[in-house]
Image: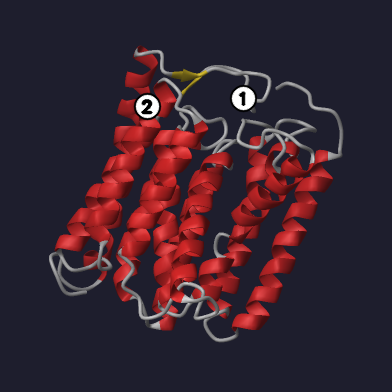
Amino acid sequence: MDGLWGEGFWGWAVVPLAVLGGTLWLTGVARAWLQRRAILDRPVERSSHHSPVPRGGGLALIPLVLFAWIMLALAGQAPTGTLAIVALAAALALLSWGDDLRGIGFGWRLAAHLAAAAIGVSLQSGPLPVFQGLLPPLLDRAATVLLWAWFINLYNFMDGIDGIACVETIAIGLGIVAVTWLAGAVADATMPALALAAGALGFLRWNWPRASIFLGDVGSVPLGFVAGWLLLVLATHGEWVAALILPLYYLADATVTLLRRIARGERFWQAHRAHFYQRALAPDNDHRAVLVLIIGGNAALVLLALLAVGWPRIALVLAVLAVASLLAQLARRSRRGAARPL
């Protein structure tokens, strides 16, 4: 690897190791500060936890990841437009921190997500449109903005049990690293993806069941934004099937749940416990058991994303079946019995 950090193993390892170590340390600092300031996620009827937990761990994770991306961009080891994406992610983090503290209306949040996605789409420099020429250019960009904004929101919606957002981010990050290596394309997305996965892994040390700190919107919203951008980079360089497969569980759980809530006439933008992973907690409130199922499903999706490099249609069919099986397992678990407190 040429550039600021030299070649060989350490050239690849220094940035993710720094992000990992920094997140492990800074999350502990942030947790103590949040506790002193009483910035806590207090249990309500829809909560999956039973005691107050510090909320706002994204204050530790996001700045470290974004700083690493800045360094990678300056060293020429990140995609074109990375610095602008960092600025947009930082703006979303600030807005989301305000939402964590005081609450911001859904309409304002959605407008901000759409605006960030629209600016991000204008920065795309890949040789192919996201929808691979199936849509006219203007419609392709409009659809990409909506898809990206939805991805940002579902990342927030799905962050409802211990560890799940970190596990998903690690799977997406490492999946992108593996696909870029195997495909021999989009090499400049590799290091940002690795830094993102390393940060999520460091935070998972504190967020693993039982979690001692939550990401908060300040963490989940910018994570969805930057992970979505890396997936779009894959898609615009021809690896659109892999880009679809890697987050397919998140997409399926969030989208199916949303459609069900709309069909029932519910206020779909409000907090709830209707996701497959949330209902799977019903028998015993065992976050770890549910998380293990999701880790297994995501591991299968990473392998299928690799298969998609050579056999995209077969991989996509198998990925749909894998996600359907995971959702069925979660649904089956939800029917095992009535919830009981720990």
237 vs 49, left or right, is: left
Q: What is the quadrant of residue 43 in the picture? A: top right
**Which is nearer the eye, 232 or 198?**
232
Residue found 47% across the figure and 72% down from its top: 130
Of helix, strand and loop, which one carries label 1? Answer: loop
Image location of residue 100, percent across then percent down: 43, 26
Q: Going by the image, does 62 lie left or right of 333?
A: left
Quick one: quadrant of the C terminus?
top right
Residue in front for this viewpoint, 12 or 93: 93
Tell me residue 234's x, y (percent).
43, 71
Q: Residue at x 80, y 46 (%)?
A: 331
Q: Residues within 10 Å of mark 1 (few under 14, many from 20)?
A: many
Query: In which image quadrant can residue 216 be found?
Result: top left
Q: Which mark is residue 36?
A: none
User: Taking 119 as reference, is 51 left or right?
Assistant: right
The residue carrying mark 1 is 49
Residue at (76, 36) in percent of width and height? 265
Q: Where does residue 51 sit, x and y in percent of width and height? A: 58, 17
For the N terminus, the quadrant is bottom left
- What amino acid is found at the position of numbered circle 2 in the picture? Gly
Closer to the camera in the image, 318 or 113: 113
Viewer-nearest of discs 2 and 1: 2
**Crowd rating for badge 2 (residues with CA inside 10 Å; few <14, some 14–19, many 20+):** some
Q: Can you give x and y, in whole percent of width and height, for residue 208 in the image?
A: 52, 37
Q: Is residue 169 above or below residue 263?
A: below
Q: Which residue is mark 2?
A: 98
304 relative to 148, above or below: below
